[in-house]
């Protein structure tokens, strides 16, 4: 016998068991979002302002948007953050089983919207105009094989961060004409794999903002003190997002980016384009729209506060990537050591291919690499590091 259980989860007063229980009407959407974020996941670093600014990005106003990688082990909260982003934008979460064509079509479709405008002529009172909507893509729990097995998806990510390069052309078998798709928007994805340390995805990691997530038991005592939590009370301070109905939450996002706030975003973006200092050219390129969103929304009070926050983040990112340099860094140190040993022995430096294979496998076994790299990737990196292959051994080229 079937039963209708939907009434058990409905709210008679449109308040109880909904997001409205968590929302303070006296505060702005950005302030409420920050408050909810801080009660949803306890981050190991105070990057809630960067996270909130990214979640609030108005894609229709942006030019260059980095990708947001939520990374950490199971139970660290990365999927919970992805879920909150999907609630805010009113979109479904993509999974690793989704195909390139499905994601491409979905992104293109959700960017399109209609607005009703007064008609200036006779005969009609109003007419509809197609405009670009603010939207976002959320992709949960992916691993490197998704990009390795689908080069088209990797290209979508590589070029979909810049509005000027986001167009995808596909030939239609039915009409013979080219179909045009656009894939530009914020893209949030979660993974246990450290993509920012993986040399197979050099182009991707140059365009990443990484938010590390950790289980509460992995947080330092200093960080727990900053978050005002203890081993005994942290569970009672966390929000269970699944306990609430989030229907209608995305309307707050749509309403927030009205013409007035949008104009302020455009003005701030123009100002930042000529005034931002203290960031590298690459950091600056992918940070301007993010900074504009944070300042226009009030998460950051001004340019100085935004730059200080991002400089602090980029310093962490630099230390993180240098400390965990991935395959390229390991090969670089290995070649340096082998060259030093050869010089001390009065020999020309050379590394046999079987010797290199054994060393790479050792790095996997010891945990320095998340998984065994493909021989082709190792070969390309060796060439990049100035080595050349000759009769079964690598020599300085």
Image (tube, grey):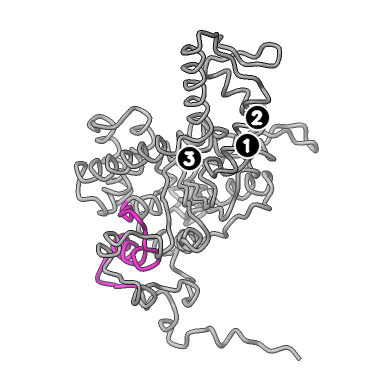
Seen from the viewer's position, the closer of residues 72 and 251 is 72
Residue 370: say if magenta.
no
Circle 3 sits on which residue? 196
Dot 1 alpha-carbon crowd within 10 angstroms: few under 14, some 14 to 19, many 20 or more:
some
Q: How many marks?
A: 3
Circle 2/circle 1 CB separation < 8 Å: yes
Residue 7 lies in what quarter of the image? bottom right
Camera-side mark, 2 or 3: 2
Q: Residues within 10 Å of mark 3 (few under 14, many from 20)?
A: many
Q: Which residue is mark 1?
A: 361
**Sequence-first tag of 2 and 3:** 3
396 with respect to 134 (left or right): right
Quadrant position of residue 154: top right
The residue carrying mark 2 is 357
Q: Nearer the viewer, residue 130 or 60?
A: 60
The residue range painted magenta reads 23-49
Which residue is most to the front? 345
For the residue labelled by badge 2, is the local secondary structure a helix, a strand or a loop?
A: helix
Q: Is residue 41 magenta?
A: yes
Instruction: Identify the mark at residue 118; answer none if there is no mark.
Output: none
* Mark 2 Cα shell of 10 Å, populated few (<14), some (14-19), many (≥20): few
Is any part of residue 146 visible from this angle? Answer: yes
Residue at 51% of width from left, 60% of height from top? Answer: 79
Tags 1 and 3 touching, CB below 8 Å? no
Please say if 336 is above or below 303.
Answer: above
Q: Residue furthest bottom?
A: 1
Against 300, residue 256 (above or below) is below
Q: Quadrant of the N terminus?
A: bottom right
- Cα gap from disc 1 to disc 3, whole angstroms: 21 Å
Residue drawn at (60%, 34%), measured in percent from left and top?
A: 155
The answer to whether residue 159 is visible is: no
């Amino acid at each position: 016998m079937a039963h209708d259980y939907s009434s058990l989860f409905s709210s008679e007063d449109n308040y109880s068991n909904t997001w409205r229980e968590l929302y303070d009407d006296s505060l702005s959407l950005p302030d409420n979002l920050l408050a909810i974020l801080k009660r949803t996941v306890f981050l190991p670093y105070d990057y809630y302002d960067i996270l909130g600014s990214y979640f609030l990005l108005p894609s229709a106003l942006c030019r260059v948007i980095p990708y947001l990688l939520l990374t950490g082990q199971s139970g660290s909260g990365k999927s919970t953050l992805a879920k909150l982003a999907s609630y805010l934008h009113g979109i479904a979460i993509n999974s690793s089983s989704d195909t390139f064509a499905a994601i491409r079509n979905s992104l293109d479709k959700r960017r399109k919207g209609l607005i009703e405008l007064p008609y200036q002529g006779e005969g009609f009172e109003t007419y509809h105009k197609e405009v670009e909507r603010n939207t976002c893509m959320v992709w949960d729990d992916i691993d490197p094989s998704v990009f390795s097995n689908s080069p088209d998806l990797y290209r979508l990510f590589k070029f979909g961060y810049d509005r000027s390069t986001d167009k995808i052309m596909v030939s239609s078998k039915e009409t013979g004409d080219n179909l045009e798709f656009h894939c530009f928007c914020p893209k949030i994805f979660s993974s246990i794999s450290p993509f920012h340390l993986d040399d197979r995805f050099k182009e991707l990691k140059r365009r990443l903002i990484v938010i590390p997530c950790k289980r509460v038991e992995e947080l330092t005592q200093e960080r727990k003190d900053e978050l005002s939590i203890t081993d005994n009370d942290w569970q009672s301070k966390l929000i269970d997002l699944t306990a609430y109905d989030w229907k209608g939450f995305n309307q707050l996002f749509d309403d927030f980016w009205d013409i007035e706030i949008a104009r302020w975003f455009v003005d701030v973006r123009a100002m930042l384009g000529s005034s931002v200092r203290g960031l590298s050219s690459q950091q600056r390129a992918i940070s301007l729209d993010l900074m504009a969103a944070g300042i226009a929304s009030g998460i950051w009070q001004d340019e100085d506060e935004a730059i200080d926050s991002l400089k602090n983040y980029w310093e962490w990112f630099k230390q993180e990537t240098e400390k965990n340099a991935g395959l390229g860094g390991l090969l670089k140190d290995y070649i340096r050591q082998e060259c030093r040993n050869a010089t001390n022995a009065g020999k020309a430096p050379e590394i046999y291919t079987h010797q290199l294979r054994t060393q790479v496998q050792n790095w996997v076994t010891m945990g320095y690499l998340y998984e065994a790299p493909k021989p082709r990737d190792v070969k390309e990196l060796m060439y990049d590091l100035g080595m050349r292959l000759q009769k079964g051994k690598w020599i300085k080229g």
